[in-house]
Image: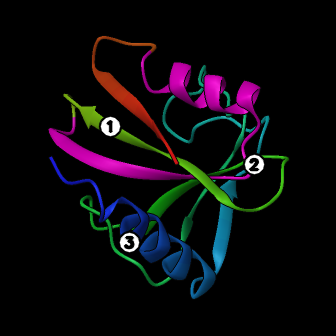
């Protein structure tokens, strides 16, 4: 299998993030608006003026490291019956582990972490 377009994928994500405003609407330590027992362990938001599979902006997790894209999470939500990509920007290894745990804590959502 030819993986030569992998770099093109990451370059396209770099451009998308560079050309978009990052909005953090759920900062680290805040609670989910519908699920009050869910606390965000990493800053969470979206890219303004973009569209993801759920009709909202493309989701981002923004860590405490250098602000480069270092991974993506591909998720399946069995309650919403959708699948999405979440871009990880500047996440440390610990923050990546937190994001991974977040998307795999319940039987209703599962995710895979794809590193750059």
Residue 92, percent from left and from top: 77, 36
Tell whether 89 sits left or right of 65. Answer: left
Query: Which residue corresponds to the image point at 65% horizontal and 69% vertical from the top-left?
Result: 23
Quarter holding residue 78: top left
Determine whether the residue tagged by mark 2 lies in a helix, strand or loop.
Answer: loop
Query: Which residue corresponds to the image point at 38% horizontal and 71% vertical from the top-left?
Result: 8
The answer for how far apart the CA atoms under marks 2 and 1 are is 20 Å
Determine whether the residue tagged by mark 3 lies in a helix, strand or loop.
Answer: helix
Pointer 3 residue:
8
Pointer 1 residue:
75
Q: In this picture, which residue range is highlighted in magenta?
A: 80-104
Tell whether 5 sits left or right of 91. Answer: left
Give whichever of 72, 61 is nearer the camera.
Answer: 72
The answer for how far apart the CA atoms under marks 2 and 3 are is 30 Å
Residue 104, percent from left and from top: 42, 18
Of pointers 2 and 3, the one earlier in the residue sequence: 3
Which disc, if any, is residue 27?
2
Q: Are marks 2 and 1 in contact (CB under 8 Å)?
A: no
Q: Is residue 101 magenta?
A: yes
Of pointers 2 and 1, the one earlier in the residue sequence: 2
Of pointers 3 and 1, the one earlier in the residue sequence: 3
User: Looking at the image, is 111 positioned above or below residue 9?
Assistant: above
Query: Which residue corresponds to the image point at 57% horizontal and 88% vertical from the top-left?
Result: 19
Q: Residues within 10 Å of mark 3 (few under 14, many from 20)?
A: few
Q: Is residue 4 magenta?
A: no
Quarter holding residue 54: bottom left
User: Looking at the image, is 42 positioned above or below residue 56?
Assistant: above
Q: Residues within 10 Å of mark 2 (few under 14, many from 20)?
A: some
The answer for how far apart the CA atoms under marks 3 and 1 are is 22 Å
Which disc, if any, is residue 63?
none
């Amino acid at each position: 299998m030819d993986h030569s377009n992998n770099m093109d994928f990451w370059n396209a994500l770099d451009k998308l993030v560079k050309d978009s405003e990052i909005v953090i609407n759920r900062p680290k330590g805040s609670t989910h608006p519908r699920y009050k027992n869910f606390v965000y362990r990493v800053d969470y938001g979206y890219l303004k003026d973009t569209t993801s599979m759920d009709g909202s902006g493309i989701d981002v997790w923004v860590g405490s490291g250098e602000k480069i894209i270092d991974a993506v999470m591909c998720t399946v939500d069995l309650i919403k019956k959708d699948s999405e990509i979440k871009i990880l920007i500047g996440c440390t290894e610990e923050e990546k582990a937190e994001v991974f745990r977040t998307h795999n804590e319940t039987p209703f959502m599962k995710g895979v972490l794809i590193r750059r």
